[in-house]
Amino acid sequence: MITITKKAAEEISLSTHNPDTQGLLIRFAVDQTDNGFQYLMGFDDRHEGDIHLESNGIEYILAYEQKALLEGMVVDFDQMQAGEDYSFVFMNPNDPDYTAPEKKHAPEKS
């Protein structure tokens, strides 16, 4: 469903040590706007109708209604360009504006 790279999993795992996130799961979501997809992630409770999965040791959830928009997405933690801060990167072949990077773990555009 969603692949969380090892680097992203390590970063998410660090956040689980915060007392405010105890008992919560990481949730992935996407908003479709006029400017394209806007990706959201954060800790949340599991709700009825959520899909509950695991990747690289990280349990995550998403709303069933989001499944078609998020299927095949890869979440990484990297620099977009040399010298920039590290951040979460969402590589989603369902995004109309998606261009696959040259890294081997990136999904191909559907």
Image: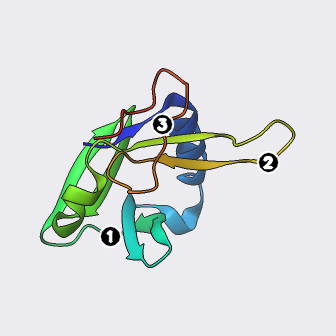
Say above or below: 56 vs 73: above
The answer to whether the residue labelled 2 contacts the one labelled 3, judged by CB atoms less than 8 Å apart, is no
Quarter where residue 33 is shown: bottom left
Q: Which mark is residue 85?
A: 2
Amino acid type, mark 3: Ala
Going from the N terminus, do you reach mark 2 or mark 3 first? 2
Q: How many labels does the image show?
A: 3
The answer to whether the residue labelled 1 contacts the one labelled 2, judged by CB atoms less than 8 Å apart, is no
Going from the N terminus, do you reach mark 3 or mark 1 first? 1
Amino acid type, mark 1: Asp
Which residue is label 1 attached to? 45
> How far apart are the alpha carbons under marks 1 and 2?
29 Å
- The quadrant of the picture occupied by the C terminus is top left
> How far apart are the alpha carbons under marks 2 and 3?
21 Å
Quarter where residue 72 is shown: top left
Q: x%, y% of residue 91?
A: 46, 44
Q: x%, y% of residue 32?
A: 38, 73
Q: Residue furthest right?
A: 83
Which residue is label 3 attached to? 100
Foreground residue among 100 and 87:
100
Residue at (12, 69) in percent of width and height: 49
Secondary structure beneath label 3: loop
